[in-house]
Image (cartoon, coloured by chain):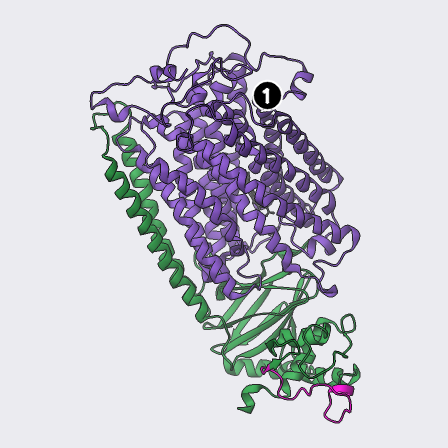
Chain colours: A green, B purple
Amino acid sequence: MNTIFTLPEASTQAARVDGIFAVLVVVSALTLALVFGLLVTFAIRYRRGSEAKRGRLPEIVNREFEVSWTAATLFLFAFLFWWAASADVGALTAPSNALEVHVLAKQWMWKTQHSNGAREINELHVPIGRPVRLVMTSQDVIHSFFVPAFRIKQDVLPGRNTETWFKATKLGVFPLFCAEYCGTDHSAMRGRVTVMSEDDYTRWLSRQPEGDDLAHLGAKLFVSQGCSGCHAGSSSVHAPKLDGLYGRTVQLSDGRQVKADDAYIRDSILQPKRDVVAGFEPIMPSFAGLLDDGDVQSLTAYIRSLGQEQDHE
Amino acid sequence: MSDVVLAGELPFPQRPDYLAAGSTLRSWLTTTDHKRIAILYAVTITVFFFMGGAAITAVRLELFVPNGWFLTSDTYNRLFSFHGIIMVWFFLVPSIPNTFGNFLMPLMIGAPDVAFPRLNLFSWYLTLVGGAFAVYTLIAGGVDTGWTFYTPFSTMFSNTHVLTAAAAVFVVGFASIATGVNFIATTHMLRAPGMTWFRLPLFVWSIYATSIVMVLSTPVLAISLMLVIAERWLGLPIFDPTRGGDPILFQHLFWFYSHPAVYIMVLPAMGVVSEIIPCFARRRLFGYDFMVYAIIAIAGIGFFVWGHHMFVSGQSPYASLIFSFLSFVIAVPSAIKVFNWTASLYRGQISFNSPMLYALGFVGLFTTGGLSGLFLASIPVDVHVTDTYFVVAHFHYIMVGGSVSAFFGALHFWWPKITGKMYPESWAQFAAITMYFGFNMTFLPQFFAGYLGMPRRYHTYPAEFQLYNVMSSAGAAVLAAAYLLPLMYLTWSLLHGKRAPSNPWSATGLEWTTSSPPPPNNFDMQPLVDRGPYQYHAERESAGTDAPEVQNARSLR
Ligand code: HEM
Ligand SMILES: [Cu+2]
């Protein structure tokens, strides 16, 4: 838990962020000491009526000072940018073996769902030492998933998936906050992330009620919503087959290429006219309004379970 | 108290000053004198300042305890929204430009008035209309969107008075645009003979740059608010994702205005400080032309960093990298300014009158706020601290520590010129110092609370953040008291203050060459300018070449 002075470093990101943070603190402290030091020294030494020597500075000295401190700050800032940014680029995408957890935000609670179907509200249990990828969407307004101990924060948007990931490095229970103002009970939209050992986690997971896992739910929807009528292998309608689609690069009829990720699949279901696959007619109806965000997540999990590009290579 | 030499009264003929030129309410409400319009603005924004202050006092009281004790969540949300909306658009944006800019810009360039006097008055009326919408919103029950109006919360989910709040901001935006256009035209067309661009005081430069930012960015604010109104009122699908809209589009538009708006708030403050420091250090400002280039650079680059408010919004990571880089770049000219103000003290004859205390306070607080900006520009760190109290502390250091300190500095520096009265200097020094300590006590703890993870806009919070919140609330009480002090002794000075001479600080600007308060048409004779600003003599004093400042002033006439 937090104490009032320190924040635990409970993820791999946390150590990285705190490293940059510490350097910035040092740079700031030195700069502040320099500015305050000079202000105070000059204020005392050159106060009105003191005996200090006055007189004009040669113009050339002015120039030299200006040019050198401009260049110095520019180099310092460029270095800080490069350093902080490269840490960020390194942490952009989750490792491919990451555990996938779906997060659905709504006013004012967090719903999480594990890939085997186990669901939690305002809670998230994860194993230590395994990367966890969060695929998040919101049912209403913008929220933001914030776990201070992990130094992660990501806005959760309606109508879109956003992702973040972490690898927990400490056992324990850590607060989860909503960081994007979302209405009346914004400040009560809190939860807990529990980091468990791998064994405890497996045990915990097996004790959860037998939720249908997402892919199974998706498989049922695939039939009941009529997707299979066109996309199933046996169908006579000319529609793309979905086996092995996930993660592949798709050629579109207007010449663009897109990667078949969660966002693409979501768009294809809700706004099928937007990205039409090359060689097919835009005949698919939109399912916007028929499927809610949870349904789309299930269908996505189902399509993912049909095989991924990596598995074929 | 003041140990600056009080220059003797210049031998002006007796004639009415601009204050005495008419005393009916009508003469004020129909005036086109830029100086009177400045007073109208000053009164208006003072009222708003204390309204916004009252709202946040309630918020800070509520935050004494983790789970709240006298406000409901809804009331809490409406109070901080009202505080933000009022402070940004009805105080900070108009504060220095519309009061001191209006009063001083024509005087400083030797002009009889602004270029479009009636437009100037009209823009004050627009401010009133906008203010009326804001006050109506409050009376009708308030708005709970925060000052940022993020969609789709504001368009589809809030059931408070979003439309009138948006209308308030929309209307007051046009006052900014009108003022900006007016100042740009004034600077271009009405400079006195000899007042070349590189003889302009830095205050004029900064108001000029601010005006350009206002004119270019405010229309984008108007458009984004129009879109909010169109979706909320007419049901057009703009931000609603279930109908193909894009909720993030609003953030891009909003920050395209609101980031440059930060410079609308600090550039004028920088201008003020650049006037005060040379005067009380009796030194030429160090690196005048670098200061000018820095102003231009800040105003220009300010348009290209808006995405640093959106690192966690789900925008493209490559866009984030570019915005991060540009955010570091824009910190360079700000750093140059800090170094130059500091260097201006070197070999000076420094006296610590209250305007100088505010200016030095500004340099310290602005530096702290600016350095905390480096944390926010670094993407991985920003991901952790954005939308927490770290950000609240950061923007208060810049906007309140910076802008509001400079506003008080300006108030004390030009008060004798504006009102013709002197104020009790020791009270003013006391207020300045109290404000500085109250400010740090209020906002320093928020950096810690933010780093430890306390999100902003939280009505209730985990108990481990309580210590910091109590410190912050206690500081706010000190700060509030410090803000009330000037209200008292300045009012006192209006009634009982000593008459101010035309140039009480022996300053060099053109505004000090006319009487205090100035006559309606500013100058008896067209001023002629034969030198750059800040020709203070400390640097020559010990070198033996004495150049008394009062003669300088006369030779301009
Ligand atoms: C005694 C002085 C002040 C105190 C104690 C104070 C405190 C606060 C607090 C607690 C918040 C809410 C933070 C949150 O919940 O996210 C806030 C927000 C804000 N304050 Fe102040 N403030 C003060 C003065 C000012 C002044 C003078 C200005 C501008 C002139 C200002 C501008 C703002 C803005 C723009 C916001 C953002 C509102 C929002 O989150 O929607 N504040 N302030
Ligand atoms: Cu939320």
Q: Is residue B345 left or right of residue B216?
A: left
In the rendered structure, does residue B129 fall within the stretch colored magenta? Answer: no
**In this rendering, would A109 be left or right of B353?**
right
- Residue at (52, 49) in percent of width and height: B303
The residue that disc 1 covers is: B33
Query: What residue is shown at x 34% (from left), y 32% (from top)?
Result: B285
- Residue A192, relative to residue A269: is it above or below? above
Q: What span is colored magenta in the figure?
A: A228-249
Q: Amino acid at mark 1?
A: Asp
Q: Could you say where residue B352 lies in the image, as x and y percent from the top left?
A: 36, 26
Residue A13 drawn at (x, y percent):
45, 68
Instruction: Determine the residue positioned at 69% across, 38% down.
Output: B134
Tell me, yes or no, if residue B554 can be seen here: yes
Which of B532 and A87 lies nearest the eye of the viewer?
B532
Residue A229 drawn in magenta: yes
Q: Quadrant of ligand 2?
A: bottom right
In the rendered image of this protein, does residue B346 appear above or below residue A242? above
